[in-house]
Image (tube, helix red, strand yellow):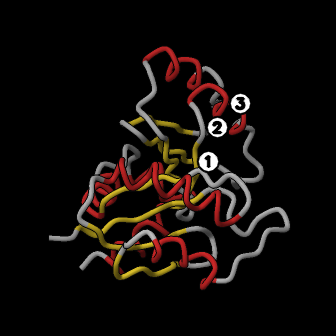
């Protein structure tokens, strides 16, 4: 039995890099994954396989970096894991409503330690809301994302390599590919 999974790739089609969907998806197909499809041109890939997601994650990161010619941090989650993180949104409706749907979900390679979480939370400006939950964290900027003072790169140095998606993107992927 195969499981629907999503791969969230970091730094695809940014900084002068441009991959066509065919180039993006080819390494997934040659890895023996099934029902492979891209969502938007931002490193979001849906696929099916019957292997452990963590095993697939490590294999894909290596395969993609080799195929693309640059490091490609890869974060794989099952559709059920994505559904769960959508359901556990830690911010209330009164927090989310004025932000016009800008809630971000950041995927991590591993669960940060309590010390890492405390260090990251110490960097969060008063204007923004951040909540950690397992191998991801939520960010709700009060203003625009680009106008926020949240030091995302400093937080990454604390908790490790990560990639970020909007809650809306994740919801649309589940609707489109969630079977």
Query: Residue 127: which numbered mark, if any?
Result: 2
Q: CA distance from mark 1 to mark 2?
A: 7 Å
Relative placement, left or right, of 76 versus 119 is left
Q: CA distance from mark 1 to mark 3?
A: 16 Å
- Give whichever of discs 3 and 2 has the lower sequence position: 2
Q: Is residue 154 above or below residue 27?
A: above
Q: Quadrant of residue 63?
A: bottom right
Q: The N terminus lies in which quarter of the figure?
A: bottom left
Query: Residue 141: which numbered mark, if any?
Result: 1
Q: Nearer the viewer, residue 168 or 62?
A: 62
What percent of the width, then of the height, locates residue 139?
A: 54, 45
Relative placement, left or right, of 128 versus 130 is right
Task: Mark 1 and mark 2 in contact? Answer it, CB < 8 Å.
Answer: yes
- Give whichever of discs 1 and 2 has the lower sequence position: 2
Relative placement, left or right, of 131 versus 140 is left
Query: Residue 123: which numbered mark, if any?
Result: none
**SS under mark 3:** helix
What percent of the width, then of the height, locates residue 143?
A: 68, 51
Q: Nearer the viewer, residue 14 or 99?
A: 14
Residue depth check, mark 1 versus mark 3: number of the one nearer the observer = 3
| Mark 3 lies on residue | 154
How many neighbours does mark 2 have within 10 angstroms: few (below 14), some (14-19), or many (20 or more)?
few
**SS under mark 1:** loop
Residue depth check, mark 1 versus mark 2: number of the one nearer the observer = 1
């Amino acid at each position: 039995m195969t499981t629907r999974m999503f791969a969230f790739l970091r730094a695809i089609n940014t900084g002068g890099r441009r991959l066509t969907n065919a180039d993006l998806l080819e390494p997934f197909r040659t890895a023996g994954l099934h029902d492979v499809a891209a969502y938007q041109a931002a490193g979001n890939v849906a696929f099916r396989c019957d292997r452990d997601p963590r095993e697939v994650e490590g294999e894909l990161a290596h395969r993609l970096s080799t195929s693309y010619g640059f490091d490609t941090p890869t974060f794989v989650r099952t559709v059920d894991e994505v559904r769960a993180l959508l359901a556990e949104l830690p911010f209330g409706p009164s927090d989310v409503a004025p932000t016009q749907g800008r809630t971000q979900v950041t995927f991590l390679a591993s669960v940060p330690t309590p010390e890492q979480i405390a260090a990251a939370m110490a960097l969060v400006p008063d204007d923004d809301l951040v909540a950690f939950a397992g191998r991801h964290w939520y960010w709700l900027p009060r203003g625009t994302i680009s106008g926020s003072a949240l030091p995302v790169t400093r937080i990454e140095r604390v908790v490790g390599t990560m990639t970020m998606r909007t809650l809306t993107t994740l919801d649309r992927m589940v609707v489109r590919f969630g079977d």
